[in-house]
Image (cartoon, helix red, strand yellow):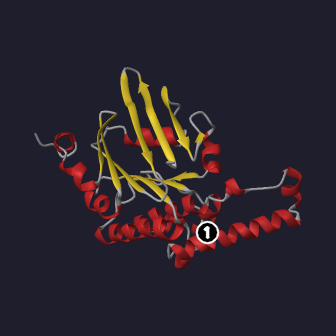
Amino acid sequence: MALLEVGDLGIGFGGLRAVDGVSFAVEAREVFAIIGPNGAGKTTLFNLISRIYEPDSGRIVFDGRDVTRIPPHDVVRAGIARTFQNINLFDNATVLDNLMLGRYRRGRGNLVQQTLFTPFVRREKFADRRKVEEVIDFLELGKYRDVLVDGLPYGVRKIVELGRALAAEPRLLLLDEPSSGLNVEETRDMVFWIQDLRDDLDMTIVMIEHDMSLVSAVSDRVLAMSSGRVLALGAPAEVQRDPNVAAAYLGTA
């Protein structure tokens, strides 16, 4: 059974169908890429899956559970985390503090326990810190642990946002243009991170990406979109050869 199933999903804004009857399934430990020109509906699709937007039609099933109408915070608790095209970090907090925010879904204990900082709550906090330190080691962020995010290079900030998502221990990771704004060396590093997430952490990844070299390097399958609809779905090379994709995504006749 697929880990993520999207069936006939749709949403409109005014008279525009931003996502129009999109269906696909993602298997466990698969790297699944979504490509398409600007305005194709890719980020809107992510916003539907992560429950930022309410769909007009269709359904989203994750790990056998219908999550189409659950609150956004329950999506994280269910095991789905995401990054954003525009980095969303707390600039005046350290890397460590930003990553600790990714652990909030793991918070346990009632209000009284939290207020009194009982031994149970302390154990949970220590466990959260250990997990975040594992993420820091995995992403080689040790030298930035206590540095304010505001003073970090853009490429490092992208890795910090990835780390915050990983701190939530998701089974499904949604990456919105992970190579956007990165140089060639940083993009090559991102290829290794994505491969390691799948191979070492058994993670399933769905990513939106424009860099076709990255898509070809890491993706098992690719879904191409245009005007809110699916153009093609298959292996990276197969999708790139599709004439409809060439016309819509590459701008050729």
Report the residue at 55% width, 39% height from top. 51
Image quadrant containing the C terminus: top left
Please tell me whether residue 142 is drawn above or below residue 217 in the rendered image: below
Residue 174: x %, y % from top left: 47, 52
Between 226 and 133, the one lying in front of the other is 226
Residue that protrudes farthest toward the top in the picture: 15
Residue that protrudes farthest toward the left in the picture: 253
Between 69 and 140, the one lying in front of the other is 69
Please tell me whether residue 216 is drawn above or below residue 63 in the rendered image: below
What type is the residue that disc 1 sits on?
Leu
Q: Could one spot residue 18 in this view of the protein?
A: yes
Residue that protrudes farthest toward the front in the picture: 1
Residue 175: x %, y % from top left: 44, 54
Secondary element at image label 1: helix
Please tell me whether residue 5 is drawn above or below residue 172 in the rendered image: above
Residue under circle 1?
Answer: 96
